[in-house]
Structure formats: C-alpha cells, structure tokens
Amino acid sequence: MEKIQFKAESKRLLEMMINSIYSQKEIFLRELISNASDAIDKIYYKALTDDTLTFEQGNYYIKVDADKENRTLKISDTGIGMTKEELEDHLGVIAKSGSLAFKKENEMKDGQDIIGQFGVGFYSSFMVADTVTVITKALGSDEAYKWESQGADGYTIDTHPKETVGTEIILKIKENTEDETYDEYLEEYRLQSIIKKYSDFIRYPIKMDVTERKPKEDSENEFEDIQEEKTINSMVPIWRKNKNELKDEDYENFYSEKHYGFDKPLKHIHISVDGAVRYNAILFIPEQIPFDYYSKEFEKGLELYSNGVLIMEKCADLLPDYFSFVKGMVDSEDLSLNISREILQQDRQLKLIAKNIKNKIKSQLQGLLKDDREKYKKFYESFGRQLKYGVYSDYGSHKDVLQNLLMFYSSKEKELVTLDEYVSRMPEDQKYIYYASGESHERIEKLPQTEIVAEKGYEILYFTDEVDEFAIRVLTNFKEKEFRSVSSGDLGIEVKESETDTESEEKDNKDLFEYMKTTLSGKVKDVRVSKRLKTHPVCLSTDGEVSIEMEKILKSMPNNQNIQAEKVLEINTNHEVFKSLQEAFETDKEKVNLYTNLLYNQALLIEGLPVNDPVEFTNDICKIMV
Ligand code: ADP
Ligand code: MG
C-alpha cells in the first residue's frame, strides 16, 4: 500500500516533536482523551437537532486499555468517528489543529520548545509511540477505516472491519531508552493518575480495567488478582454544580483534595459568569500564610481548565500580585486546549477573566470587612502586608482598588481601623490624617513626637510594617485628607504659643542654636525650637521626603544607597534642660558640647536608632554624674 506523505509543515513539526526532549510526555493521554470526549460531544449536539438520533448517556464512554505484553495502549471512544476524508483532513495536516498557524516558518527552525508551548493534539501520541493506529467508523457510514503511521514518513489509510461507531487509537509504546522509560505508560497505576490529573472532569466516564487483589472465594488466606472495569474520573466538577447544593464542607474538601493548602480556607468564592466571557471559578482565601509566601520562591497562580481539562497548573496571569494569596481554579469553555503560554498572555478572553476575577476578589474582601470584621482582621493579619505592597507597587496604579481594604492600628481604638473610619471620625479642625512609625505599638505610644497630636485629641495611625510609610507616600491622601507624619515639619496644628513666639525664641537663642548645630555638624541639618514637645526635652524630626523610619528600611536593603533623612533636632524650650543649656552657653562651652551630644543621642535612642558611639555616650553620662 502506498504511503501518503504528511503535508510539509506537519512533517517538520512531527520530527521536532519526536526528537525533542519534552518534559511532559504524559500529556499525550490528555490530548487523546480530550479528542474522544469532543467526538462524543459531537454526537450529543447532533442528537439535539436530529430526531432520528437519541443520546443515551450510558452508551457513551471512553475506554483505556493497556496491554503490557504487546506494549500497546488503546484509547477507544463511542464518539462520532471519522470518514475517510476526515481522516485525511484531520490527521494528515497538523495545521488543522490550529497550533501551527501561530508560528512562522523561520521561527520554527529553532523549535526546541515549540512542543512545550503547544499542546499538539493528536500528534503528541508520537512522543511515546513508534506506531499509531486509528481505527474508526463514522456515524451514518457503512465503511470503517484504519489509518496508520510510524511518524514523519507518512501514513496509510485502508478499509478495516469495525462493528460499532467510534474510534480506537492504538499506540505501540516505544521501548525504554537509556534516558527515558516508556513502560510507565502501560502501568495501570500511572495511567490512572495521569487521567485523574488532567481529565478528571471530562463529562463522560473514562473506564479502565483495574486489577485488585481480593481474597479467593471460600478461602481466607488465599488471594487472587481480579480485573474489574472502573470509571477513573469524577466527571462532574464541583464548579459546575449549583451553589445552593454545595456546603462549606464540600468546598473545604475540594481545597484539601486539590492540595491548595494544609489549612482550612478562610473563605471561598464560587463564580459562574455567563456573559461576554463565560467561566466558572472557585477561589479560596487561605487562613494561614503559606510558609514561603513572602519569599522569592512563592509562585502565584490559579489552575486553568478549558472545558474541564487542565491546561495549566499555575496560570499567573489570572491574579494580580496584590491578590497573589488567592488559590483556586478557573474553567472556561472559551479557551482553546492548544494554547501556548505566550498566546495565553495576549488572550483577550483570559484578560477579561482576570479582570473579572480581580473585581470579584475585591468586592468579596470588602464584603468580608463589612459583615465579618473578625474574619477580615484575621485575613488582614496574614495578607495585609501584601495589599500594602500592592498600593506601593507600579507607581500607585492600584491604589483605587486597594485603599478601602487597608487597615492600620489606631491610637484611639487600640485596634485595626480603616481609613474611612478614621476620616469619618476626624474633628472639623483636624487637617491631616496623622501617623507615627516605629517598631511596635508600645514604642510608638511613647514617642515624644506624638505628644502634641495626642493632646489635641487627634487619632494617630501606628505604622509598624516596613511597607506602611512607603505605601502611604504613594497614596498621599484619602478622601482628600492628606497623610502627615507626627514627625514632619508642619503638623497643621495651632499651638498656644504663636508663630512669633517661636520665632522670637529662636532669635533670642540664635547663637546657642548655631553653636549646637556646629557641634552636631554632619549629623543634623538643623537645631530648632520644637512646637510639638510637651514633656520631653528633645526629639528628632525631618525635613524633606525621607523619614527616619524610611532611612532605617532603606539602610537595611541589600542595595543600600545610603539615603539619609534630613534630621532636625528639636528642643523643648519649656523644659528645665533648656535652661541648663542656656546657662552653660554663658559660662562653659565644653558643657554645651556635652549636653548637646547627650541630647542628640537620647533623641536617636527614642527613635530606635543606635547611638553613634556607645562608649563615648556612656562616658558622657559618667561625666555629668561626677
Ligand atoms: P484538535 O483537537 O485541536 O482539533 P487534534 O490534533 O487533537 O486537534 O485533532 C485533530 C482532529 O482530528 C480533531 O479536530 C478531530 O476532528 C479529529 N479527531 C481526533 N481524534 C478523534 C476521535 N477520537 N474521534 C473523532 N475525531 C477525532
Ligand atoms: Mg485535540
């Protein structure tokens, strides 16, 4: 019988596929099962409009048979089958599967990873088989045919007896080589697990004869191997079920079956969208932070299914980074099985789904915040930091999505509050949203810089996460109220002493301040009269963009660029210590040096910064003790 050559492009792709080392050879089974399922679908849809046809669910199935002795693996279906023309058309040209059209000729020469990028459908069977035989009988046809190929050199077609409508694909599994074992594709257990992994939600039963060791009849200690036909796949995926029929427990089971996490999900989101884009999704917000969550190793992504068939285990494009903690899956009929990562990235449908999902997650989180604050706080303790990174990242372009989900510890409520709650409580004369940064709530509480704001009765947000201040700088304001650090130059608070008082005080003590500034040269930008201190003698504040907290964080970063805050030493002129300074300035300049250094180091310590020279500092203290 004459061999018919594959079309040129098919030939090249086939050769590449057979020779390339493809890490996931196992997907051939997914492809063949999907084709079988498609073929059954075709009968199903035909029956909807054709009165002479009835579709009896029980008659339609896919069967997988492994024959170790003959090294054959057979995938049969009771689908629509193929006519001779269809065999030639569909299995003679790879381009028909739609894959090839995407790659231009010259790009394909280095086609190393083309197989990795494309599910190449039927042809992927050549990755594991030397010979592929297709025996098929089309619906409504009297003749059946056999198509056979050993790969790139072409195929033969001939008539062949077959009683029933449908298709059998018989793979002659390759012999093991030094680097590759092919035996596994004849192992019951391995085949079952591949079917479970990729094809669990195919709508028709995928059957296999499964061997089980059972006690012999009339005997207790003698066993025999019994083969029994079993359905391997679970068929109806939970995401296609009606939400009303599902309990929390069902979702929790799904979460652990899918190994999304060892914890229980804090919340599940079941989405069924039937509009411009159609998809089902089940998403979870975990209760606990995955151990590697805030590390480089963590990979975000959702499982992506096309009509019940897994096409990607972690589709990163479906989740924005700020919601990277979300686990789950998406299934859409509108996505093609044969789709590459690159193409997926540009896929319009996928983009729509991603946008849709983002909005759903946002609104669900907002709902949780509103209806179950305790749960939301639990969530926020785990993943709030990620939301704040989200505000900061991409030049603040996500702030509108995220700002209403933010919470900070409040000096007044002594717990997490939202920005909206803060602003709605602001007294009329309060200009800004005040915040203070520090290591812990306890430390911030004691910061001298908070005194004046706290005395005014204004609420202060405590920033203890590294990212907090950076995020807020990007946000700049909330509901038109600007954020202001309690350590910033202008607090917008009317103090009892008027501006002129401060000014005249500064003028009166000009020489003293100048002297102190010289003593601290290189360490502070300025020495000033403080408008915010009540009981403490000194504190540090900053001019410019970089705060002291930010300096600390920037310093701890690997590519430390030595960015410094412009520090200002503020002096409480109402404090006893100031009088001592004034006296010393008249009589003993050495003493002014000593006091200045001590006060500066105190201010550093209050900020949680190390003193410049601890030995000198303790010596200085000793000097004033003797
Ligand atoms: P795709 O499924 O993307 O079309 P494939 O390479 O997997 O690409 O299959 C090519 C074509 O061969 C299918 O579109 C279908 O028409 C035909 N085909 C493959 N397997 C079967 C089968 N089991 N029954 C009927 N037709 C089949
Ligand atoms: Mg296919």
Image (spheres, grey):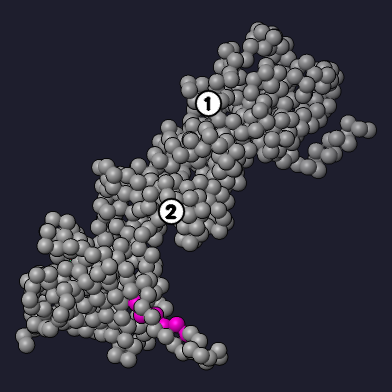
Q: Quadrant of residue 468?
A: top right
* Residue with the most extreme front position: 218
Residue 623, numbered label = none
Q: Amino acid at mark 1?
A: Asp
Comparing 122 with 475, the one in front is 122
Q: Which quadrant does the N terminus fall into?
A: bottom left
**Helix, strand or loop status at disc 2:** strand
Mark 2 vs mark 1, foreground winner is: 2
| Dominant secondary-structure state across the stretch colored magenta | strand
Task: Please report contact status of discs 2 and 1: CB closer than 8 Å, yes or no.
Answer: no
Q: Position of residue 470 (x, y in %)?
A: 53, 36
Residue 420, numbered label = 1
Q: Which quadrant does the C terminus fall into?
A: top right
Looking at the image, which residue is at 84% across and 35% down? 620
**Residue where numbered disc 2 is placed:** 328
Magenta span of residues: 208-213
Separation of disc 2 and disc 1 at Cα? 31 Å
Q: Position of residue 93 (x, y in %)?
A: 13, 70
Residue 563 visible in the shown view: no
Q: Quadrant of residue 124?
A: bottom left
